[in-house]
Image (tube, rainbow, N blue to C red):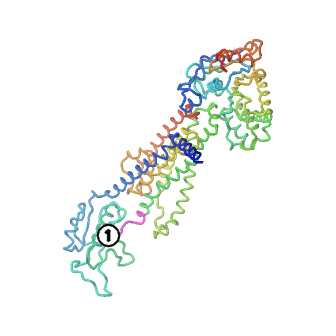
Amino acid sequence: MKNNTLTIIKKEFARFFGDRQLLFTTVIMPGLLIYLVYSLMGVGIQKMITEGQNETVALTVENMPQSMAPILATLDSSLVMVEQPISDDDIAKLEDKDINAVMLRFPKDFDQLTIPDLGQPVPNVEIYYNSTNNASSRVYYALNALLSNYNRPFTVNVPQSEEQRFDQASEENIGAMIWSKLLPMLIIMMLFSGVMAIAPSAIAGEKERGTIATLLVTPMRRNELALGKIISLSGIALLSGISSFIGIALSLPKMVSGEGIDYSSLGFHYTTADYFALFLVIFASVLIMASAVSILSALAKDVKNAGTMVTPFMLVVMLAGLLPMFQNGASTSLLVYLIPFYNSIEVMVGVFAHEMQWMPVIVTVGSNVVYTGIAVWVLTRMFNSEKVMFAR
Amino acid sequence: MEEILKVEGLSKTFTLSRKQQKIEHTNTKRKVAVDNLTFEAYRGEIFGLLGPNGAGKTTTLRMLSTLIRPDSGDAILDGCSVVNQPEAVRGKIGFLTSELKLEDFFTPNYLFDFFSRLHGVPDEVKETRKKEMFGRFGIDQFAEVKVANLSTGMKQKLSLVISLVHDPEVIIFDEPTNGLDVLTARTVTDYLQELRAAGKTIILSTHIFSLVERLCDRVGVIIDGRLVACGQLADVCGGLSIEDRFFEMYKEVKGGEE
């Protein structure tokens, strides 16, 4: 009995350790991926924390208390402080998310404040800022933390009327920020799932079933076969991605309605040009995904093997989809738009953040088309290679 | 007789993986599958490549059908080189082997149309040919049934039909009766004879002596990748049966070991 158990254990170990690919994907890859994921997340979080730290922030203070002046002066080296009355027009200027500014209004005689009599209003410190501007947001949180620890009888940012808002970010900008962090990841995931659902079967499956050889003995050129495969797979994956995207767009407001966010006011307010750019970049993304998965599937012996080979690649793409969570707005460097997969995510971030520019879209679509051309060439070579096509 | 295929010095060596070395019981990393093969075939004949398993027959046919590339040598098929004009060669041949499968999801009707398009068969020719071939092999009743739901015999007949959609001049057939039930095997061999009568050239590989005796006009005997005899069946046999003559040659090559 014990011997049989040992025999089974030996057989399972021999099967496992004899398969180098399985060994890599189950033992080496998880550690490698966790290292990669956590390192990249660390870089992202660090970037999010430090982003805007070097940018100067204009802090306008009304009724500056004597006791606060030295503290505020040393609060943040990036602050440029001005003491002056704050008008409603000044506050309205904060709606522009590109302005790094915070306005702080103290009650008069802040240093002499005493606990108010029962029924009398509690003095309130007002901090006006824009949450969609990183620098403004950072200074707001710093001031809030400072004042919350200040031993005085006052409140901070308690609205005195229904209309009073301290965060001057427009609903559109808040919506854009949320969509730009959330949707690129979801779209990429949906598109990749679509590609994964069909590409391994269409290439590795044909190898496994022996139907690819039937195609290879026809007079059709190998590059025609490669191009036909990639375009058809892209088309189907695109349809699958569109279906998933519509599902997300319709269900997202319902899904998050319990979070206390009024998503009805954060609806899509995108232009036709935004939608056109989005379509272009989604199509370019699908092309490159289908190309990459097709190449990996052509290398695989069968569908199962293709799944194993594509998994690490899928995780890297998913990870790239997470990066917008740690950034505010799209990258301004055109070189970023030459990086396959990540370029599409960056363009999507730009579109959803209302910062779409045509040059990144053109660079992304152009580079993805070039990469797809290279992939067609590689796949053609693979269809020509007996080692790849008939490997056992 | 018009020469339609000229094979000259065709060679192919495979690199063996460790797994394959174990299967082959060898320590050498390279295996010569086909060694300097030279023969020819003529229009309107059935040429048989006879040899034991692993002799190099399938590798030879795969090189002729351009699925794999020879390391050296070439074959000129109806004026086209398998090395330099593989697409043109593929347009002239019908290749059938048990390795080639059809998509289970599709119907015979769809597959016939699909492969006809890939071979550039004009629509009107395709329809006439489909009717004739489907009728000849009894596929017409199952034309709209998915391949997955066809019997094994019907699938094999469909594979044969699909490989001939473009009415090729040369038909390359690897082990034509392997795995076929007796009825389908008979249908196939009868059809090969019909094709020969129609002036087509058939190159087939087999290890079945009776098949060679029944079908082949000329034969090449291949052992360990080398052609040890080639010519008219009667000349190769030299008064013996093909089976007896083959074992004589086999002993000569292998030095008595079997």
Left or right of residue A40: residue A250: right
Left or right of residue A253: residue A58: left
Residue A96 % position (x, y)? 35, 63
Q: Is residue B233 visible?
A: yes
The residues colored magenta run A167-174
Residue B13 % position (x, y)? 56, 24
Left or right of residue A372: residue A170: left
Q: Is residue A350 visible?
A: no
Quadrant containing the C terminus of chain A is top right
Note whether B246 is above or below A239 in the view shown.
above
Q: Which residue is mark 1?
A: A128
Quadrant of the image occupied by residue B63: top right
Note whether A108 is above or below B228 in the view shown.
below
**Nearest to the observer: residue A274 or residue B181:** B181
Residue B144 % position (x, y)? 75, 43
Label 1 neighbour load within 10 Å: few <14, some 14-19, many 20+: many
Residue A344 % position (x, y)? 45, 49
What chain does mark 1 sit on?
A
Q: Magenta span has A310?
A: no
Left or right of residue B158: residue B38: left
- Residue at 47 percent of width and 40 percent of height: A371
Q: Amino acid at mark 1?
A: Tyr
Note whether B124 is above or below A165 in the view shown.
above
**Nearest to the observer: residue B45 or residue A41:** A41
Quadrant of the image occupied by residue B113: top right
Q: Residue furthest bottom?
A: A118
Q: Provide the secondary structure element on which disc 1 rests.
A: strand
Note whether B129 is above or below A252 in the view shown.
above
